[in-house]
Image: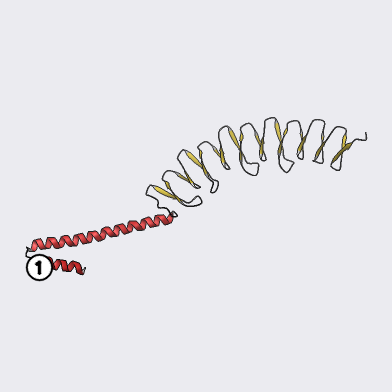
């Protein structure tokens, strides 16, 4: 401020009309005020950028972006897209939530664990993890059975057996056989004794 007053005093000391002197002094003060305002605006914009960066990890999002916090780390995504794990989905996609491994699938598909089922597939959720099977098959534990199979669920791990067979533990008994203690199949002329098949006395 003292520097500006000295410049104003020098302007008044010069041999010129009072009107010209006042114009010079007014222009000097106007430039100073505008410069201060512009510097303040730049500082404010810088603070806004820093706040945006803080809201989106180490990145700075533009005005046409949003901050996604759905993944392992924040990231900037163009407006109109959907945050989905570590990626962004376009408007013609859907988000399949799967933690940090979330992914985008085509609209009309069904989210199924780490993948998606289309119109010719089904999603099986009968096992330890969801999986996709061909339409027409039916879910059976960690696998799928064909239309001519049945699902045996007596065992620790469900399995497929041909229709007409009897579920027996981890196997399926054919026609004329009988299940022995849900362990083994005995033939027609065998008896089930202690979980084993033995020859019949008759």
Residue 4, above or below 117: below
Q: Nearer the viewer, residue 165 or 75?
A: 75
What is the image's colouring? Answer: secondary structure
Q: Nearer the viewer, residue 9 or 162?
A: 9
Q: x%, y% of residue 145?
A: 67, 34
Q: Residue at x 38, y 57 (%)?
A: 50
Q: Residue at x 15, y 66 (%)?
A: 8
Quadrant of res 91:
top left
Residue 54, above or below 81: below
Q: How many marks?
A: 1
Q: Is residue 96 left or right of residue 47?
A: right
Q: x%, y% of residue 20?
A: 9, 61
Q: Quadrant of the N terminus?
A: bottom left
Q: Is residue 68 left or right of residue 39?
A: right
Q: Is residue 31 left or right of residue 179?
A: left
Q: Is residue 139 left or right of residue 4?
A: right
Residue to which mark 1 is pinned = 13
Crowd around label 1: few <14 · some 14–19 · many ≥20 (10 Å):
few
Q: Residue at x 21, y 61 (%)?
A: 32
Q: x%, y% of residue 52?
A: 40, 55
- Circle 1 SS class: helix
Q: x%, y% of residue 131?
A: 61, 40
Quadrant of res 183:
top right
Q: Quadrant of the C terminus?
A: top right
């Amino acid at each position: 401020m003292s520097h500006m007053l000295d410049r104003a005093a020098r302007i008044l000391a010069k041999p010129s009309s009072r009107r010209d002197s006042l114009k010079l002094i007014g222009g000097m003060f106007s430039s100073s005020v505008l410069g201060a305002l512009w510097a303040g605006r730049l500082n404010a914009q810088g603070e806004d950028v820093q706040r945006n960066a803080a809201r989106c990890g180490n990145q700075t999002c533009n005005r046409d972006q949003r901050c996604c916090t759905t993944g392992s780390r924040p990231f900037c995504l163009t407006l109109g897209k959907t945050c989905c794990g570590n990626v962004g989905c376009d408007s013609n996609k859907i988000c399949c939530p799967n933690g940090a491994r979330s992914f985008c699938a085509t609209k009309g598909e069904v989210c199924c664990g780490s993948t998606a089922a289309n119109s010719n597939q089904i999603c099986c959720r009968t096992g330890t993890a969801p999986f996709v099977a061909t339409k027409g098959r039916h879910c059976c534990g960690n696998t799928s059975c064909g239309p001519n199979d049945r699902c045996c669920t007596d065992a620790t791990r469900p399995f497929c057996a041909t229709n007409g067979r009897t579920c027996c533990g981890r196997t399926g008994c054919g026609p004329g056989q009988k299940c022995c203690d849900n362990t083994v199949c005995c033939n027609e002329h065998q008896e089930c004794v202690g979980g084993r098949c033995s020859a019949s006395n008759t």
